[in-house]
Image: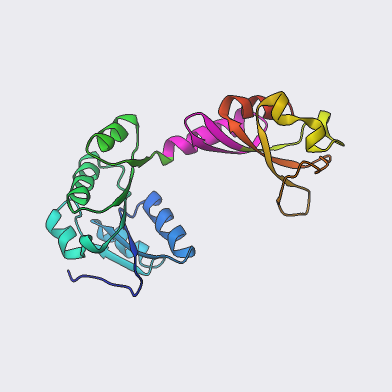
């Protein structure tokens, strides 16, 4: 395997081209970044080739394979292997040993995440858990969207409570009364705009609300 350079100062290496890896790689490309996608499975590589510009087949749990990929040239690597715990850990170790400064890794559960953190991965993501939490919030509440920003901090999209319709955000005193902040408002047929103290809440407005998870849950339940 030859070293690869794609004409930019930095290229992101995404290891593992399953659903999560493909999603990350495709999003990075849409944002204008160069991406090299790698997977041990030839079928996944062939499938990803129709969506990603640069794909290779390699076993990245093997330090020699990473060396041949030119791992030392990458500043950012995403280890998107989830289903094979051993492959995930061995690959993460090989990337750490190669001296890559920024590493993100997917974990399928808390145990997997703890192992990744224990070997030195600082940025661990739990895509399945986050998706499950988002769906649960939407199904059981009155939220139209839910984004977990941290363990106890979230952003939600919800309809404006009827008791603040006709008031400005300053008059409604949402932050003082509920401990959350309205950061954006969307009116039917319009795009989202930043919320201002003088913004008058109208019927059928959608609010983007930021705050501690329990507080935004309680606020959304009032709609």
User: Any magenta on residue 143?
Assistant: yes
Q: Which is nearer the eye, 122 or 37?
A: 122
User: Any magenta on residue 40?
Assistant: no
Looking at the image, which residue is at 78% across and 42% down? 205
Which segment is the magenta one? Answer: 128-155
Q: Quadrant of the C terminus?
A: top right
Q: Tell me how the rendering is colored.
A: rainbow
Left/right placement of residue 143 relative to residue 94 reads right
Left/right placement of residue 103 relative to residue 131 reads left
Residue 152 position in % (x across, y down)? 51, 28
- In which quarter of the view is residue 77 placed? bottom left
- In which quarter of the view is residue 87 placed? top left
Looking at the image, which residue is at 76% across and 30% down? 173
Residue 172 position in % (x across, y down)? 80, 31
Q: In the image, is residue 184 above or below residue 98?
A: above
Residue 214 position in % (x across, y down)? 58, 24
Q: In the image, is residue 4 above or below residue 191?
A: below
Q: Which is nearer the eye, 65 or 216?
A: 216
Residue 67 position in % (x across, y down)? 16, 61
Q: Which is nearer the eye, 83 or 173?
A: 173
How many numbered circles does the render carry? 0
Q: Quadrant of the N terminus?
A: bottom left
Is there any visible trace of residue 110 in the rendered image? yes
Q: Which is nearer the eye, 126 or 45?
A: 126
Looking at the image, which residue is at 24% across and 34% down? 118
Looking at the image, which residue is at 28% across and 52% down? 101
Q: In the image, is residue 80 above or below residue 110?
A: below
Is there any visible trace of residue 221 in the rendered image? no
- In which quarter of the view is residue 122 placed? top left
Q: Residue furthest right?
A: 166
């Amino acid at each position: 395997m030859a070293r690869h350079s794609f004409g930019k100062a930095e290229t992101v290496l995404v290891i593992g081209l399953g659903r999560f890896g493909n999603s990350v790689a495709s999003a990075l490309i849409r944002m204008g970044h160069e991406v090299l996608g790698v997977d041990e499975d030839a079928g996944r590589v062939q499938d990803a080739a129709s969506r990603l510009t640069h794909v290779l087949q390699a076993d990245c749990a093997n330090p020699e394979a990473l060396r041949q990929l030119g791992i030392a040239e990458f500043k950012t690597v995403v280890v998107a292997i989830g289903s094979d715990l051993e492959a995930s850990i061995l690959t993460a170790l090989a990337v750490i040993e190669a001296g890559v400064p920024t590493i993100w890794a997917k974990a399928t559960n808390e145990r997997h995440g703890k192992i990744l953190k224990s070997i030195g991965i600082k940025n661990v993501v739990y895509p399945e858990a986050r998706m499950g939490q988002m769906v649960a919030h939407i199904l059981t509440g009155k939220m139209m969207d839910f984004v977990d920003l941290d363990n106890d901090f979230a952003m939600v999209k919800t309809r404006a409570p009827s008791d603040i319709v006709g008031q400005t955000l300053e008059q409604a005193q949402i932050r003082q009364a509920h401990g959350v902040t309205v950061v954006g408002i969307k009116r039917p047929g319009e795009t989202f705009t930043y919320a201002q103290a003088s913004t008058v809440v109208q019927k059928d407005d959608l609010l983007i609300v930021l705050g501690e998870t329990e507080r935004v849950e309680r606020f959304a339940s009032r709609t």
